Image: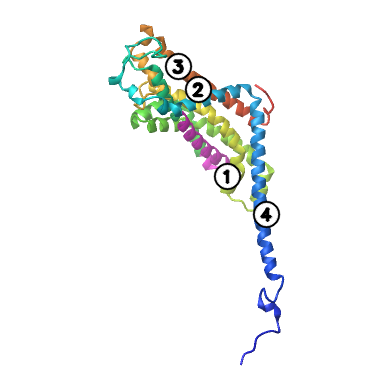
Amino acid sequence: MSTPNTANPGSTGSTGNPGGGSTTGAGSTAGAAGAVNTAGLARARRRLALARFWREYRRQRAGLYGAAILIVAVLLALLTPLLTDSAGLDVTQATGAKMAPPSLEFPFGTDESGRSVLLMVLWGSRVSLLVGFLAALLSMVIGTVVGITAGHFRGWTSAVLMRITDWFLVLPSLVLALVLAAILGGSIVTIIVAIGVTSWASTARQIRAQTLSVEARPYIERSRALGAGHWHVMTRHVLPNVAPLVLANTTLQVAHAIVTESTLAFLGASSGQVSWGGLLRGSYDWGAATAGAWWYILAPGLCIVAVVMAFTLCGRALEAVLNPRLRGVSR
């Protein structure tokens, strides 16, 4: 007959060890509390960083003006379907006279078909801003990946990537984008791809130079000595340090993409939808300048100038805030 084992109280788990269960529970509670404290500390640091960024950005008066213009432009583009009817873009439903000057009914005048130029400017802002943002995003992604890879990996990898980058730098980006748009066909996606894949080379060179500077710092060597791999070094150490440069360049790249899209539309490689560049092309085709229809040229032209200037002002302000050597310099 077996007898209960009462000689070794420690073998009975939590019953024999009065402090056993409590120790486990206390350890779990302490670990959870530590995780919560770490997450809270991270959120507090992010809030402080954003507050410091906004405090520095407010000192850049030109950047504030640029941000205000961009906010107005983006809001108008987003609210255009709610404020207007796209049916007015159809030439068969035009109600105005041919190239009529500005009036109460048509504040920006009309085009060659009697359509409201104001209506076309509002709907064209959606295409121009969309192409500008997405093309700049594609360009910055390609440039960042190529730049970090070329700066991190030395030898033949860096040499091949830099020769490809030099090839794109030598070729005229506008001509290459025009050729790609003509080959791939006219659509918004085509225009975005054509602009994005032809304008990343200068960004890649800047990111590579910044990557080489970051990887020369002592903590990168310590990270590698502790066993960090290539992916860890590039994503955890290099990318956060080049992110300010990427952010500042993105705003400038959006302005470049909008100008390029307008130029491509003016040259005939349009997406088939109303855009600011397409309006300039239409004014040229129908001789608005010789006919004295200045409103047909001025409205889309001023929109392009205003938005490009706003992005440029924001980009310069971001550069002044994020660059330690320029921080504190009010513009």
Residues under labels 3 and 1: Cα distance? 41 Å
Report the mark closest to the observer, 1 or 2.
2
Q: Which callout, 1 or 2, points at the residue further toward the start of the chain?
A: 1
- Disc 2 marks which residue? 307
Q: Residues within 10 Å of mark 4 (few under 14, many from 20)?
A: few
Q: Which residue is mark 1?
A: 235
Q: How many marks?
A: 4
- Type of residue at label 1? Thr
Of badges 4 and 3, the one in the foreground is 4
| Whether residue 266 can be seen here | no
Instruction: Say if 91 sits above or below 318 in the image.
Output: above
Q: Does any portion of residue 311 appear in the rendered image?
A: yes
**191 left or right, relative to 216:** left
Quadrant occupied by the C terminus: top right
- Residue to which mark 3 is pinned: 301
Circle 4 residue: 34
User: Percent from the top left, x then y, of residue 194?
Assistant: 41, 31
Which is more N-terminal, label 2 or label 4? 4
Q: Secondary structure at mark 1?
A: helix
Tell me if residue 147 is in the magenta stretch. yes
Q: CA distance from mark 3 to mark 2?
A: 10 Å
Q: Residue at x 54, y 39 (%)?
A: 150
Q: Which comes sooner in the sequence, label 1 or label 4?
A: 4
**What residue is at 67 percent from the left and 46 percent from the top?**
41
Circles 3 and 1, Cβ within 8 Å, touching? The answer is no
Q: Which residues are magenta?
A: 132-159
Label 1 – label 4 distance at C-alpha: 25 Å
Q: Main secondary structure of the magenta part?
A: helix
Q: Which quarter of the rendered picture does the N terminus lie within?
A: bottom right
